[in-house]
């Protein structure tokens, strides 16, 4: 009986192990930790520029106005000169230029709004920023796909790699693990096929800036909330000590 149970548990462990390995090959890669750029205004400004130039043509950020970018140190004139399309006004919402019907025909679905994407994508693998940082660095050429691209973090993604001219082209490197006849491919890294306009280090930094901007856009007041929260906790701590001493003074003569 013990041998049977041991064999059963060993079989289940092997099955779950192979399933987990295969799942990793299918897109469940470990998310890379995104750099924290929320206090870096030049980084956020560069991220906003990348967002407008490479994302806003298809993806809206309909809950964000252009003039809110003043919170990251840009003036209204800088926003007008560098981030607005011809027909936009500085008080307008960030709405994609693409026609939703055409987008659905081209990509199979209307590209989602990105205002809150850095918050909605948080999960067991890490924060939403971690997912976006991994996703935007996870593209590779795949001639079997309609767009010509696939993504290690989101297999069969409908979105092409809009940043490929900056990144260049890379191929994923896989390693086969498991018993013979039951091997599963595990992602191990990247092989650069052709160079882009940026070096790999510069590209990672640019993506970090873009992700930082997306993270800021999802909650522009988050830094203020943290600062206010710290002061509130300090006040409550001091007030608790004062209230405790006052209570002791009021009741010291009552037995």
Image (spheres, rainbow, N blue to C red):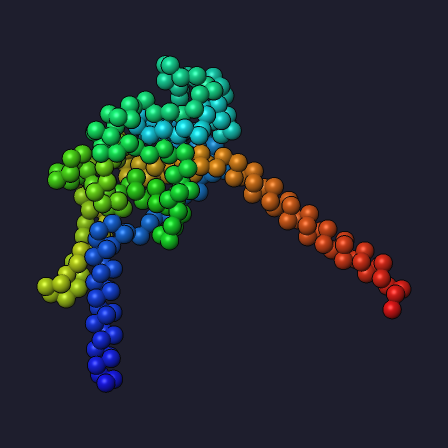
Residue 213, position as x, y percentages in the image:
42, 34
Say whether residue 5 is left or right of residue 128.
left
Whether residue 161 is visible, yes or no, is: no
- In the figure, residue 166 lies in which quadrant? top left
- Total marks shown come to 0
| Residue at 85% from the left image edge and 58% from the top image edge | 250
Whether residue 137 is visible, yes or no, is: yes
Q: Looking at this view, name the residue that lies furthest to the left.
A: 181
Q: Looking at this view, name the residue that lies furthest to the front.
A: 101
Residue 90, position as x, y percentages in the image:
46, 19
| Residue at 44% from the left image edge and 21% from the top image edge | 92
| Residue at 41% from the left image edge and 28% from the top image edge | 62
Say whether residue 20 is left or right of residue 217.
left
- In the figure, residue 158 lies in which quadrant? top left
Rendered view: 87 above or below 187: above
Q: Quadrant of the C terminus?
A: bottom right
Residue 214, position as x, y percentages in the image:
40, 36
Residue 140, position as x, y percentages in the image:
20, 40
Say whether residue 51 is left or right of residue 220.
left
Q: Looking at this view, name the residue that lies furthest to the top.
A: 86
Q: Quadrant of the N terminus?
A: bottom left
Rendered view: 217 above or below 138: above
Rendered view: 27 above or below 94: below
Q: Looking at this view, name the residue that lies furthest to the bottom.
A: 1
Seen from the viewer's position, the closer of residues 113 and 29 is 113
| Residue at 34% from the left image edge and 41% from the top image edge | 132
């Amino acid at each position: 009986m013990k041998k049977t149970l041991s064999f059963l548990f060993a079989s289940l462990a092997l099955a779950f192990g192979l399933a987990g390995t295969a799942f990793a090959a299918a897109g469940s890669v470990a998310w890379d930790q995104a750099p924290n750029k929320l206090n870096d205004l030049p980084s956020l400004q560069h991220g906003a520029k990348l967002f407008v130039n490479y994302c806003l043509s298809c993806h809206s950020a309909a809950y964000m106005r252009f003039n809110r970018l003043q919170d990251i140190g840009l003036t209204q004139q800088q926003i007008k000169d560098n981030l607005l399309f011809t027909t936009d006004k500085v008080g307008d919402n960030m709405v994609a230029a693409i026609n939703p019907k055409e987008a659905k025909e081209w990509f199979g679905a209307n590209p989602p709004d990105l205002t809150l994407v850095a918050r909605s994508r948080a999960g067991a693998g890490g924060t939403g920023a971690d997912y976006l940082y991994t996703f935007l660095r996870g593209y590779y050429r795949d001639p079997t796909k309609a767009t010509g691209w696939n993504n290690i973090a989101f297999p069969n993604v409908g979105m092409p790699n809009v940043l490929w001219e900056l990144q260049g082209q890379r191929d994923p490197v896989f390693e086969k693990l498991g018993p013979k006849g039951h091997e599963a491919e595990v992602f191990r890294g990247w092989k650069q096929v052709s160079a882009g306009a940026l070096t790999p280090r510069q590209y990672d930094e640019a993506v970090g800036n873009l992700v930082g901007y997306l993270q800021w856009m999802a909650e522009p007041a988050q830094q203020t909330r943290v600062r206010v929260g710290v002061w509130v906790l300090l006040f409550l701590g001091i007030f608790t000590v004062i209230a405790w001493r006052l209570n002791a003074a009021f009741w010291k003569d009552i037995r």
